[in-house]
Image (cartoon, grey):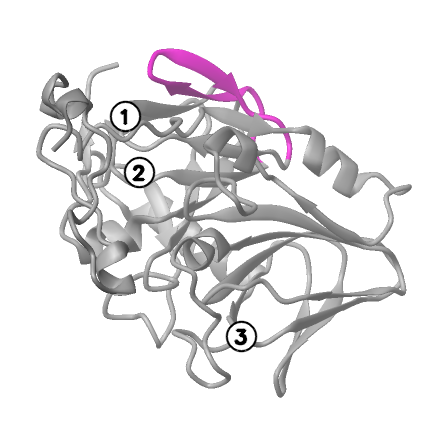
Amino acid sequence: MTETLRNLRVSEMPPQHAADPKTPAQQRARFFNSGNAFNVQLPPVPDMAFAEEPARALDPATPTGMILCDISDQLECPFPATSPLVLAGYARIRAGESLNTDPRASGVIAYVIQGDGTTRCGDEEIAWAPGDIMLFPGGAAQHHETGDSDAVLWVVSNEPQVAFEGLQPPAVGMAPTGVVHYKAADIAAQSDYLVANAEVGELPGYAIVLSSEHNEASRNVLPTLTLAMNTLPGGTSQPPHRHNSVAVSLVVSGEDCYSMIDGKRKDWSPWATTITPPVSVHSHHNGGDSRAMFLIVQDGGLYYHTRAMGFEFAEE
């Protein structure tokens, strides 16, 4: 050990190397200690809303293509990301045109904001309409086609997670999901039943959790992602709470709605994508008369699997 290192506190020491490496494998070894190993400084996940991106996606002048909610520069990620493990964006497909999407992910979620069309994935085809939700396996491209009107889809995947680990999408037939279609009418019927029949105080909120036969046991939509359509009746609020997972949400409907995130108000806007940072104390509020709806993707499956979800009610 050099004299320079002897004058440093152990928490200030740079990474240490093997003293006399004899092989390339030994040269690659790095050593930290309990003083300097846990002071990694990463930028926090921001509390923010994407309003410009949906406006562009819904603009008739915007050409067919993907519009990502990418804050990789803020997160210091070398790959596109909305949160460290989730990437959201808007697929715009002009009338009579098509778009191919093939995220490097284990699975892909798509919500139909406007328009009618079809999506082919492998040997299956879905005919979709506004309010439908689709789930596609990773490793199989999706071919989207529209009819006589423009279409916009909200598309979410765990592409950053796969990129972070330097992995490849699953081989055909090996993805953790098949093709799944959640019809808008079925989602609405489930939401209506829940609101009408849940006892006051029985639930932390009115949420329809979407899963499939592949992930039924875990209740997740993908092994590391959860998907829920949350309902907030007019004039009500969801109690403040926190959890370890990030929430990437799509504002589906609601007037005079907002969220409180660590004491700061965030107003909703139509079709905006919002980020609720992990462990932040947050609540959702509907100041209007009509029911509000928001679709939430969380990396909660990861935390459920590691037994570390950390959900709790909190004081704002």
Q: Amino acid at mark 1?
A: Pro
Query: Which residue appears at 51% of the width and 71% of the height?
Result: 138
Q: Nearer the viewer, residue 165 or 264?
A: 165
Between marks 1 and 3 in the image, the one whose residue lies nearer the viewer: 3
- The amino acid beneath tag 3 is Gly
Residue 180: x and y in percent read 50, 72
Q: Is residue 298 above or below residue 235?
A: below
Q: CA distance from mark 2 to mark 1?
A: 8 Å
Residue 94 position within the rendered picture, expressed as x and y whole percent measured from the top left: 86, 55
Helix, strand or loop for disc 3: loop
Camera-near label (2 vs 3) is 3
Is disc 2 in contact with disc 1, using a CB cutoff of under 8 Å?
yes
At mark 2, the secondary structure is loop
Residue at the disc numbered 3 = 139
| Residue that badge 1 annotates | 239
Residue at the disc numbered 2: 205
- Determine if the magenta segment contains residue 104: no
Quadrant of the image containing the N terminus = top left
Q: Tell me if mark 3 has few (under 14), some (14-19) or many (20+) residues whose alpha carbon lies within 10 angstroms of its own.
A: many
Magenta segment: 253-270
